Image (spheres, rainbow, N blue to C red):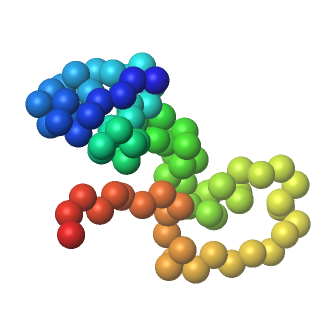
Amino acid sequence: MESFTSEEFSRDVSAAKCAAQEGPVFITDRGKPSFVLLSIDEYQTLTGGGQSVQEVFSQLPNTDAIEAEFPAAMGNVARAAKLSD
């Protein structure tokens, strides 16, 4: 795993993006990890590919006999990151 200080990340975002193709990249503030940069493939692996609860449930074995309702409000398991205040 690679690590960039906030300053290094700001100066060379491209290098951080390249490093994230190989694995998670930690971005530190004052020597402590504060953010992690991931490739989209790694992110989707961690979040289940952004599938809805209904999609995940339908892929489980032996669920044909189970009656379940999934309100539209449940949406996707994964959510986009809020990048500004």
Q: Position of residue 83 (x, y in %)?
A: 24, 58
User: Relative to the observer, which residue lies in front, 71 or 34?
Assistant: 34
User: Residue at the location (54% across, 74% down)?
Assistant: 74
The quadrant where residue 63 appears: bottom right
Q: Is residue 83 visible?
A: yes
The quadrant where residue 84 appears: bottom left
In the rendered structure, the answer to whether residue 45 lies left or right of residue 33 reads: right
In the rendered structure, the answer to whether residue 47 lies left or right of residue 14 reads: right
Compared with residue 77, is residue 30 higher up or lower down, i.e. above or below? above
User: Relative to the observer, which residue lies in front, 22 or 55?
Assistant: 22
The quadrant where residue 68 appears: bottom right
In the rendered structure, the answer to whether residue 57 lies left or right of residue 47 reads: right
- Residue found at the far front of this picture: 30
Quadrant placement of the C terminus: bottom left
User: Relative to the observer, which residue lies in front, 9 or 81?
Assistant: 9
User: Residue at the location (34% across, 58% down)?
Assistant: 81
Q: Position of residue 47 (x, y in %)?
A: 54, 49
Q: How many marks?
A: 0
Q: Is residue 40 visible?
A: no
Q: Position of residue 54 (x, y in %)?
A: 63, 64
Compared with residue 85, is residue 71 higher up or lower down, i.e. above or below? below
Q: Position of residue 67 (x, y in %)?
A: 80, 75
User: Residue at the location (57% across, 47% down)?
Assistant: 48
User: Residue at the location (36% across, 58% down)?
Assistant: 80
User: Relative to the observer, which residue lies in front, 22 or 11?
Assistant: 11
